[in-house]
Amino acid sequence: MSEPSAINSTAMAVFIFFFALVTVLGFVAARWKRGDLTQLHEWGLGGRQFGTLISWFLVGGDFYTAYTVIAVPALVYSVGAYGFFALPYTIIVYPFVFAVMPKLWEVCHRKNHITAADYVQGEFGGKWLPAAVALTGIIATLPYIALQLVGMQVVIKSLGVTGELPLVVAFAILAVYTYSSGLRAPAMIAFVKDIMIYIVVIVAVSIIPSKLGGYASLFDAADKFFQTKGGTTGIILHPSQFMAYATLALGSALAAFMYPHTMTAVLSSSSAKTVRKNAIILPAYTLLLGLIAVLGYMAIAANVHVTSASDVVPTLFLTLFPSWFVGFAAAAIAISALVPAAIMSIGAANLFTRNLYKPLFAPNVTPEKEAKSAKLFSLVVKFGALLFIIVLPTQYAIDLQLLGGVWILQIFPAVVFSLYTRRLTTTGLFAGWIVGIVLGTGLAAVMGLKPVYTLHIGGGAYPTYIGLIALAANIVVSFVVSALTQSQRVVARAAH
């Protein structure tokens, strides 16, 4: 994408207006659904009082992010049908949420657990397995926050503003109102963010095809484009991609609600019934995601040419829409970075305070100091991600986020299986976690941090998502070692 020659003043004015609006909302949120923000469950979980509507916006706000709006169309623009793996993944995930998350919510609510690692500690006792779960969540989250910055950086650049200063200012504002208001800030802003994104996407999928000769013409143009590229790209999956596509979708679905931000959004719900209702109505976002993905084909039909695929959506809007709508769309995408980044930093801060700082360094910390520690760590996480983007090339954040998915899957047995079986032990789960982390990281390193590894079985080649391979090894080791160490079961399990 060529650098804009000058700042688009109309677009920038609209952008600043909406950014200022959500900044005000972020500070006002401290007074919304009032609670004692010196307590971690109030600051970090919103007092566990969010009903169906707020939870729907909050979960949608942190699950469908700025980077989703930028990256999914970019992938479709680059590789065609393969980029749509995000659709089946979000279809698979909600039955899982419906079946599993209400049960987890009930245990966490009853025992006052704030994080997934709290739950693991409550079930198995000890410090090190919960610490492993917490550390995995924090490390997997950092590049995820960095990618929200990438999304914001792309749209700010499309308005004609270059350099890191706007990004630093935006995240400084985010840091201050998150520190002040906790989870209430992204919960309130999520209303604005989601409504804006829906407007942008509905306008785009209504108007852009009419400018390009309709959907038939649009798909025809994309089909011809990929035919000239050759290889496995196309608007229909190549048979060699079936296995990789399916395992990426399944692995991503299993990983999605293990992340601290999605877990935090679920545990902030007011009841298990609220969680179930959201699992029923959240697929509305999957429809939105499918429409967002089609923007990649629209860019092809509109003859959009960019040097970086991440610039596809902003360039498409600059090409086909008036400046005021470009500013509105840019604001919607930028705000879509703020909401998940805030929740991610809060989720990581909760894990650090509850499952690393308190048990390992300050077992007698007061509830007020616990909350203050979380607030401070949320600042560290945000500015760590900011530094990540400023100092390192963007590609590192993308690669590490893919690796983050491999890592976060390795807490699945400890968090999910323990809800349904008592055959697992601390030693077994810890051994499985180590094997999964080492194997997943090793295979990813061998593949140059690409997410797929080809398994050769019985003369056949099966490209498979590395996260699932590592998870399978993790599960086998967890159950085998647990069977050998049943006598070591912790008394804490009996209380469950």
Image (cartoon, grey):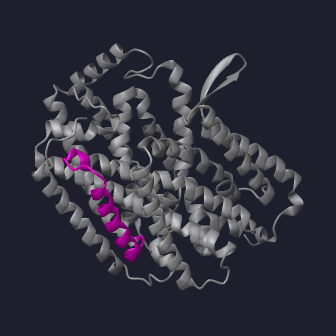
Would residue 279 be found to the left or right of residue 486 on screen? left
Check residue 494 for magenta coloring: no
Most frequent secondary structure within the magenta stretch: helix
Q: Residue at x 73, y 64 (%)?
A: 128
Would residue 359 be found to the left or right of residue 18 on screen? right
Between 223 and 94, the one lying in front of the other is 223
Between 110 and 65, the one lying in front of the other is 65
Which quadrant does the N terminus fall into?
top left
Q: Residue at x 80, y 57 (%)?
A: 427
Check residue 164 for magenta coloring: yes
Q: Position of residue 416 (x, y in %)?
A: 64, 55
Q: Position of residue 228 (x, y in %)?
A: 33, 14
Between 236 and 280, the one lying in front of the other is 236
Q: Position of residue 368 (x, y in %)?
A: 53, 85
Between 319 and 418, the one lying in front of the other is 319
Above or below for 416 versus 92: below
Q: Position of residue 381 (x, y in %)?
A: 48, 63
Would residue 124 be found to the left or right of residue 236 on screen? right
Above or below for 373 versus 342: below
Would residue 307 be found to the left or right of residue 83 on screen? left
Q: Residue at x 25, y 28 (%)?
A: 305
Q: Residue at x 35, y 55 (%)?
A: 337
Q: Which span is picked out in magenta?
A: 156-183
